[in-house]
Amino acid sequence: MKYLTEFRDGALAQRLAAEIRAITTRPWAIMEVCGGQTHSIIRNGIDQLLPEQIELIHGPGCPVCVTPLELIDKALAIAASPGVIFCSFGDMLRVPGSSKDLFRIKSEGGDVRIVYSPLDAVTIARDNPAKQVVFFGIGFETTAPANAMAVDMAKRQGLKNFSMLVSHVLVPPAIEAIMTSPSCRVQAFLAAGHVCSVMGTWQYPPLAEKYHVPIVVTGFEPLDVLEGIRRAVAQLEAGEARLDNAYARAVTVQGNLPAQKLLEQVFEITDRGWRGIGTIPLSGWRLRDAYAGFDAERRFDVAGIKTQESALCHSGEVLQGLLKPNQCPAFGKECTPRNPLGATMVSSEGACAAYFNYGRFKEGQ
Amino acid sequence: MEFNNWSCPLPLRDYPNIVMGHGGGGKLSAELVEHLFVPAFRNPALEDLGDGAVVSVAAGRLAMSTDSYVVRPLFFPGGCIGDLAVNGTVNDLAMCGATPLYLTAGFILEEGLSMSKLGGVIERMGAAARAAGVQIVTGDTKVVDRGHGDEMFINTSGIGLIPEGVTIGPSRARPGDVVLVSGTIGDHGMAIMSVREGLEFDTVIESDSAPLNGLVQALLAVDPAAVHVLRDPTRGGMASTLNEIARSSRVGISLDERAIPVNPEVQAACDLLGMDPIYVANEGKLVAIVAREQAEAMLAALRAHPLGARAAIIGTVNAERPGMLVARTAIGGTRVITMQLGEQLPRIC
């Protein structure tokens, strides 16, 4: 396929890896921000092509991983309510709340449906006027425009039975939080390509300058990731720290302006809790007052739900690159993919799940 | 869809939809058998219409298998629940090294199911049985209240005869053996997914539903003793099947991802949904683990068969990592392919 198989070419990948080896003289810790990039790294074994000095730290960019436990408990409570059709992206269904997950709610009689777009949930609402239809609106800047459009569409259509449980989070404040952490080990970032295709790259040069950290906008196919790493290492070795766009076929400086306009119209910046990390100021979006009628947290009585994260789980330190998953005391003991304590063990791109599987391989070697 | 071509014989025409009486054991049930099942499945054992079928088989070892089919929608590109129900059980028998002979068919119909849809399914079932060289010799029909079934469920059970000298089993993979696949993977699962979820792609992805007993015969003809393990990777895909074999045989399995055949449209659909074809279901493919000395001859035998044109050698069995499935990726890295916990879920990003 055009623009896809070309970026999976084995020979070119080996050449890029050789270039990275050639220019690397010292150890460097590079964080890939996006969960999609982590997935690609594990799926393709990209980390094994790199010289030993290059350490990849899996960042907090998996939306499934950073959605707070409390919000998942709210989702479960709403989904279990009579007369509700609860719609979600597929991989949120297996994320455990305090006591169960959405699959369990479904087996107990809840109407939980996997959709591929929030607009499908609007259609379901239109077709089921006697039901309350709720969409679980999570994710970074990438998924936000479609969610904004769904809410706006529901408003225009005058739908009274559609609402959204919103937990949107933003990449730049997360980068800032990581860089200001006293124990920060990250020396360069691979920024999330699809986030930048929406938001552009203009938010990043000030961060690169302020924290003197190279930021390379990077795609998701194996060659994209390797090229992102190559450019990050090149900057690190040269002592540079600037924004570089290694995903120019999808990303421009200004980004997708109509999408940004819609986001501005529907959402406003708010403080957000990140699972395992805690609250980061001004790090997310919530619905503006004009759309408050579509806020599921207001429509359903879930304000009283307060949940503490597991004290055993160190996923926050893992997400910040402070701890390797297998350095967590609960890793592989209390916490496994079958009985995950934190979302990093649940999601297929979660750092802990990836380590659990890869670790088995290493032990077997 | 094809069921529209089915012309409803009298007196079934009086009932455009299934009613409770069609499962009541009375005249309506008898009409269904006489005008629908018998003409579609036609064979002497069935036409006796006894409480059970009486068949003759040669002395030897028998393989038995049963499976239930609950697919939605009933008709999909490349097949329907009817041919799936025949091919599925035929394939389970074939994977024991058996020559499938006789099937039973149990139907659970939902009140209100359209007669022409049922007719279409039964007609395709009969055609699939003829194509696989098996006879459907006895059956049963029940009707459940509207809302208590998903249009129709089918169970098929079957028996087959295992030829002398064939000992195939999930624990017989040995270090040094070679892993073959009979064609492209992931077609069935993505075909179902694309119609079920209303995903529209430029090309229609068709299910690979097919009987595999012909391919098994071709392999056994090369050297029955050299065929160690046979499996058809249905739910959970090739990843689950090979993990199960690795565990049963206490061996490691190494795959070369570049060698695994995948249709480009299946790969594209998987990319779009964040899925991996190696975990996606197949209904007309087999995985064979064979002795290394015969691997090339087995590959040639598969490729000479119409259903095996894209067969490939995809990996080897080793002693180093018992119970583990490891793949060399297209760019030269490695990854562990684990057993999935549940079904594969579309990813958010």
Image (tube, helix red, strand yellow):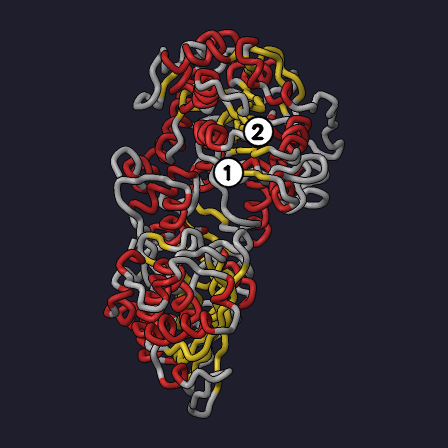
Task: Please report the residue visible at 23 percent of the width from the left and 69 percent of the height from the top.
Answer: B304
A197 vs A328, nearest the viewer? A197
A273 vs A167, nearest the viewer? A167
B123 vs B158, nearest the viewer? B123
Secondary structure beneath label 2: strand
Disc number lying in front (1 or 2): 2
Q: CA distance from mark 1 to mark 2?
A: 16 Å
What label sits on residue A132 in the rendered view? 2
Query: Which percent across, then down, holds residue A179?
Result: 57, 15
Task: Please report the residue visible at 60 percent of the width from the left and 44 percent of the height from the top.
Answer: A356
Task: Please report the residue visible at 46 percent of the width from the left and 71 percent of the height from the top.
Answer: B29
Query: Which percent across, then down, holds residue A152?
Result: 46, 17
Q: Which residue is labeled 1 in the image?
A: A114
In the displayed structure, B149 sits above or below B133; it is above
Q: Nearer the N terminus, badge 1 or badge 2? A: 1
- Chain for numbered disc 1: A
Amino acid residing under circle 1: Ile
In the displayed structure, A305 sits above or below B296; it is above
Amino acid residing under circle 2: Gln
Query: Which percent across, then down, holds residue A334?
Result: 72, 43
Contact flag, marks 1 and 2 (Cβ < 8 Å): no
Which quadrant of the structure image shows residue A229?
top left
Q: How many marks?
A: 2
> Are there few (<14), some (14-19), or many (20+) residues within 10 Å of tag 1?
some
- Chain for numbered disc 2: A
In the displayed structure, A150 sits above or below A282; it is below
> Are there few (<14), some (14-19), or many (20+) residues within 10 Å of tag 2?
many
Secondary structure beneath label 1: strand
Judged left or right of residue A90, residue B120 is: left
Residue A54 can be seen, yes or no: no
